[in-house]
Image (spheres, coloured by chain):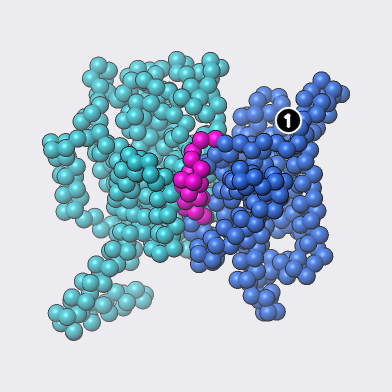
Chain colours: A blue, B cyan
Amino acid sequence: MDYAAVVVLEILYMISFIALVSAGLAIVFGMMRVINLAHGEFVMLGGYTTLACFRAGIDLWFSMLIIAPLVVGIVGLIIERLVIRFLYGRMIDTMLATWGLSLLLIGIVTLIFGSSAVSVPAPISGYRLGAYQMGGYNLFIIAVTVVLYVGMWLVLRFTRLGLIARGAMQSAEVASSLGYNPRTVYMVTFTIGAALSGLAGGILAPLTGLLPSSGGGYIAQSFIAVITGGAGAVIAGTLTSSAMFGTISQIVSFASGPVLGDIVMLALAIVLLRLMPQGISGRFFRNSQ
Amino acid sequence: MKVWPSIGQMRWGWFILGAAVLLAWPVFFDTSTPTLLLTWALFALSLGLMWGYAGLLSFGHTAYFGLGAYVYAIAVVNIGESTIPLLLAILVPAIVAAIIGAMMFYGRISDVYMGVITLVVSLILFKFMSATAGDKYVIGDARLGGFNGIPGFPVLNVPGMPDVSLFGVPLYYVAVVALLGCYLLSRWILARSFGRILVGIRENESRCELLGYSVPAYKTAIFSISAAMAGLAGCLFANWAEIVTPSVFSLRSAAEVIIWVIVGGLGTLVGPIFGAIVLGMLKLLLGEQTLIDNSLILGLILVIVVLAIPRGVVPALQAWFKGRARIRTQRAGHLRARRRIAAPASERTP
């Protein structure tokens, strides 16, 4: 019984992990059809921002929940103004340029923080569940993910900003003919997406540890979650694919080790993309967000 | 008058000059670094052929490079004599690419999804090979060895003579022959109707489809050929390094080859080769100092090239030289120049 609870909690944690890491990418891909290969590095930057603030004596909660998204959002804004805005409509070129950015960010972080692994202490201590020792911080991550996605849904569904965003998502032309400059919408979207990635990085930093190259570890999961989720319905699609990949990866991990879990997840993603080139949401959730 | 730049226009003079320089090099200089640069050049050529002419960008081409290296190492540990392992190192990546390519291209997957799938394939291989430490992961006599990779396997030997091994200067010559051979093969492919249809697919896929060509078959074929070349490059790399580690599959090396090709230039064969050699040298030089991180420079180069010269350096230079030549002829005589410039336009209209 305890073991079952542990398995369920671990699966929930894995789903939240994937959904949290993918949120920023999902928004940018869903709204702008821009595939940001520097996404993993945004997450990594969020982690390092948290670390730097924590070392400077700022409260850990404040640094991960407020400062990390702010800083990474500003970095995203700068990158959008300097690079991305020249490449709209050129998807492959955008992927290449953002890949270059990812290498650039890795280089800069290595320059500042060095290339050895560092960690941030977990602010919530563990608890016992029957015979098992559990990380209390995992529960916090699950809660944050739920709040984040509910918040995203509420904003998209019920606010004027969300209305404009959905409009621009469905038809950039119509939105611009109604007076909303799509370039501004894109700029705001990219900044928000970067801020969400920074938030994810800050929150996950105590769990995963930090390396300049650790962005590469996030990119595979978030990519396949967002792409198989599809661009048609960002929230529903990303949540569904996160749930599916998280569950399968964690079950395989319990059965035969974490590496096989990752591999099965990636292989499944390839098969799914072959079967549903439009993504899950392109097939099942055409009329939702 | 040519319609597509550099198809069927083999410049034999330049080729012979380049071959002569490469062949004479060991007389004067050290060959260790040049051998490595040549394997990288061959790797870049394989991607440049596919990306520049068929318009297919594999984001994880390092998967086939790495497969070539691993297949060679595993096979040669088991067999001992290197002829069959060398062939396997070319064949296995070609077959794997044919399977993956057929799955993607017959599924009509768009180029962006193709980028993601190819990238995921190399990530799978990276994760798998990194996790193969221990006695459980053994193929025949070869231990896969996880992060430490497979060290100390026999290097290439003269076919049929297992005792005469090729390393040092002979390995350099093997690399030269491989590069020049693959270059000629690529030229030959591009000069045939197969190559022309590939360029046609790059320019207008549905038109080629409507003309009755099976677009997925052509794409799968060029993907497989390109993977075979990458596999050969990987095999040479394994022989140069005398160890294969999972880092051949890493994101970093996947990015590097793309940078070499795009900096060198799309739609040329010389461009990727030069890109790989120049940037490879830069990488080795940067590796010697610790002040600035290597990936910072690489990333900066990629961003700037995509923004400023998206066609790459070699095509930009070619266009510049052509422009200069045109100005010169214009100065020489207005009438003759006007005829020269007018001619291609009139030929283009059917």
Determine if the magenta segment contains residue A105: yes
Magenta residues (range): A98-117
Q: Position of residue A210 (x, y in %)?
A: 58, 39
Image height of B318 relative to A238, above or below: below
Quadrant placement of the N terminus of chain B: bottom left
The answer to which image quadrant residue B159 occupies is top left
Image position of B203 (left or right of A45): left
Taking depth in this image into account, of A76 and B21 the one nearest to the observer is: A76
Taking depth in this image into account, of A97 and A93 the one nearest to the observer is: A97
The residue tagged 1 is A251
Image height of B185 relative to B324, above or below: above
Image position of B59 (left or right of A146): left
Taking depth in this image into account, of B39 and B28 the one nearest to the observer is: B28
Looking at the rendered structure, the secondary structure element under dot 1 is: helix
Image position of B232 (left or right of A214): left
Q: Residue at x 28, y 64 (%)?
A: B318
Image height of B31 relative to B113, above or below: above
Q: Main secondary structure of the magenta part?
A: helix
Q: Residue at x 76, y 36 (%)?
A: A124
Image height of B24 relative to A104, above or below: above
Q: Residue at x 48, y 40 (%)?
A: A114
Q: Position of residue A196 (x, y in %)?
A: 67, 53
